[in-house]
Amino acid sequence: MAINHSARIKVAFTHSSTTPLVLVAIGACLAVSIGLLLIGTSAAAAVLFVLAIGVVLVAVWSPYWALVMATAQFAFIPCEGELFGHFVPNVLQFLGPLVLGVALLRALKDADHERLSLRLPDFIVGGFGLWGLASMFLSGAAHWKWYGNRMLFPMMLYFAVRLLPLKRKHVRTLILILLVAIAVQSLLMFRESVAGSSPLYRVQPGLAQGIKPASGPFPFNWNAATYLCLWPSLFIYAIAASYDWRKKLTWGVGLFAVLVASTRTMERAGIAAGLIGIAVCLLSPKLRRTALAVIGILAVAYIPWSMGNAGGALLDRFQETDQSRYAYRTAAVNLLKSSRWNPVYGIGWANFDDVAGEFGTGEEIVMWGTRRMTVGEGAAGSALHNVWLAIPVEFGGVGALFFIGIVGGLGAGLLRIWRERGTKAVDDGLVISIAASLIALAAVGYYQNIYMMPESMAVLWLFYGLLTAHPRVFLEAEPGQAASEPDGLGTQPGSVAKRG
């Protein structure tokens, strides 16, 4: 059949959208130019300025790519930490509302009633976030700024994901970009722990035997370990989904860079949680061979690693006696039994450390392997370090019910994914790898107050939105989308499908 070239050119021109791209390119050049001028004053200010202008420009062009930038930057830009030696405020105050706002405007513009209609998980997630504010108000002790930075702004990413018309290719692209960012970050963290600094960050004081623990863009090394444990299972998915051995090798190098960086944080809980995520991948037939290969390589590498200085120092931390969490749990249980705890609204978010010392005991314990003190002394002034217990203690019974609803919503989302299968099979590798990431976060939450870590919370709500609101993206690869068809994310292709 003859091809009408003039018609093809006309259609391609009609569907192309070069003007927004030109405007974005011009704006990006201006932002970079101003950023270079600011470097002489503050390198951190220059980087943040370019990031802010860049995300705004990208958001005008496509809310999807604004979401990608907003989530990928966690690997490099601190939410509240040091960058080039300068303190950086919480960038989620800017990115959260921006990404949510453009996603909402896009849905309104498209008049997509399915995306705009509220669902039960929306009420549960929103109710949980608002109840945290209410519990602080009712308890009379509030950390309004902290709560907004570490709970509400990350939660906005859930609603942004809910409102975007994501397809399988968008989710895969998002995950692959995040993995590249995490791999680069891990290499910087290794440099940080070995050399005492990296091009972006400064290392913290050593924990054991002069070993410098890496923290990357995070304020503390335990935040870094908690964030890193989210990604090994997804690297395994990237390896298993690659058919070319070069790509498998590349993703494998990225995986082991993350694992090495995890060990350099010197944080035991994060390392164990990452390994749990790898083990969960064994549940997927598509991931099982890759997961077994990774486990085998780790088993072989363990012997020479454990004989090195860094490995020996970390193993000493695993073997040390540390009853600190026993002290926190004891104080928490005694608090739950007291009149100080309100069964409806608890004691208010992040208020445990203010009252924990009052509910300890005189039992003597060993804290952090070196100090002997009573349970009351050990619990005083410390956070609970167990999110599963902290929810009922600080959010009360209503908050605990919302939390149970969130976990139940995740289970319902997984069930909905399996029910979506018809002519297409479910990509169990993608489902299990994301679920394994959340299981790793849940495991490390037994030892850390993960809701105080905005980067990890942002990824939690990102993945939660995918699993509960977009079941079709977890089906096997869709047929190629016609190039002339808009993708619904604010971008337009520049060519049309071939016709014969």
Image (cartoon, rainbow, N blue to C red):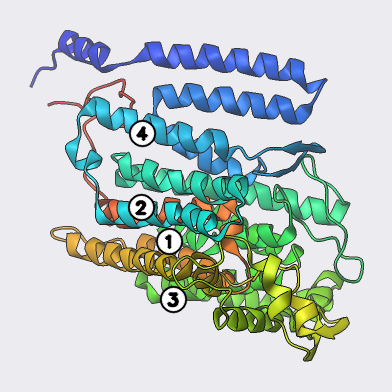
State left or right for residue 499 relative to residue 105: left
Gap between marks 2 and 3 measured at Cα: 22 Å
Question: x, y percentage for residue 239?
Answer: 48, 59
CB under 8 Å between discs 2 and 1? yes
- Closer to the camera: disc 1 or disc 4? 4
Q: Which residue is mark 2?
A: 466
The amino acid pointed to by label 1 is: Ile
The amino acid pointed to by label 4 is: Ala
Dot 4 crowding, Cα within 10 Å, few <14, some 14–19, many 20+: many
CB under 8 Å between discs 4 and 2? no
Question: x, y percentage for residue 452?
Answer: 61, 57
The residue nearer to you, when weighing 310 against 127, is 127
Mark 2 vs 1, N-terminal side = 1
Residue in the picture at 46% in, 12% down = 23
Q: Which residue is mark 4?
A: 103
CB under 8 Å between discs 1 and 4? no
Dot 3 crowding, Cα within 10 Å, few <14, some 14–19, many 20+: some
Image quarter (top left, top right, bottom left or bottom right) of the C terminus? top left
Gap between marks 3 and 4 measured at Cα: 36 Å
State left or right for residue 82 relative to residue 426: right
The amino acid pointed to by label 3 is: Leu
Q: Which residue is mark 3?
A: 282
The amino acid pointed to by label 2 is: Leu
Question: x, y percentage for residue 389?
Answer: 54, 75
Gap between marks 2 and 1 measured at Cα: 9 Å
